[in-house]
Image (cartoon, rainbow, N blue to C red):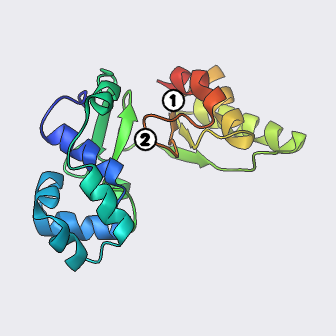
Amino acid sequence: GEALSTGADLDWHRWIRSDVAPVRARTLLDKYGSPAKVFEAGEAAWRAHGCPDGEISRLRRWQQLDESEIQVLRDPDLWVCHEQLPDYPPLLRHAAGVPTAFYVHGALPEADALWIGFVGTRSASPYGLMAAEQFSRELGRVGAVIVTGGSYGIESMAIRSALEAGARCCVVLPSGLDMWYPEDHRRLYRSVI
């Protein structure tokens, strides 16, 4: 992917920030072809496609970007992976209810890589933490890409042990670009890049 710059990249950024439900987002993009055309279609078209008031409010809000938002996008390692790019993960193309676009900081592993997701409790037992550590380390050593949401407990343990083993990792952030969650994992997230 390439860093966000102007035009279509910024349109995809506005699209992500408008937070349209995945199935409705798919319908709108199929109908209009691009985020820019969806924004141009306007409120009557959005209502005709079943957008509730909250989505309409966000679509209106994100029709334009302000300078503070553009500042967030100046990171050269940040890009939007969207379904119209060849980098969009093939398994997501055929899954229902997935985002039509998402942010990537750094590079995505190749499409044919073995991706292993770790999801678990934030208040893990010692045994749970040990198991996450051992599984992620060993899977990482054989070339698996370790994927988590980066939360406390099992997920952060999986990332830390995979990184220590030299494995590739991916953290799917549950929040936007302007909010790291959990905040004290910012250094951990940065080490994944």
Q: Which numbered tag is attached to residue 37?
A: none
> Marks 2 and 1: which is nearer the front?
1
x 11%, y 64%: residue: 41
x 43%, y 41%: residue: 113
Q: For this rendering, which residue is in front, 65 or 160?
A: 65
**Amino acid under disc 2:** Ala
The image quadrant that residue 91 belongs to is: bottom left
Q: In the rendered image, which residue does mark 1 sit on?
A: 168
| Category of crowding for the residue at label 2, using alpha-carbon neighbours closer than 10 angstroms: few (below 14), some (14–19), many (at least 20) | few
Residue 167's place in the image compared with 130, above or below, is above
x 30%, y 70%: residue: 24
| Category of crowding for the residue at label 1, using alpha-carbon neighbours closer than 10 angstroms: few (below 14), some (14–19), many (at least 20) | many
Q: For this rendering, which residue is in front, 140 or 29?
A: 29
Q: For this rendering, which residue is in front, 58 or 73?
A: 58
Q: Would you say residue 95 is visible in this rendering?
A: no
- Whichever of callouts 2 and 1 sits on the residue coming sooner in the sequence is 2
Q: In the rendered image, which residue does mark 2 sit on?
A: 113
Q: How many marks?
A: 2
Disc 1 secondary structure class: loop
Q: Position of residue 3 (x, y in %)?
A: 25, 27
**Amino acid under disc 1:** Arg
Question: Mark 2–mark 1 contact, CB under 8 Å?
Answer: yes
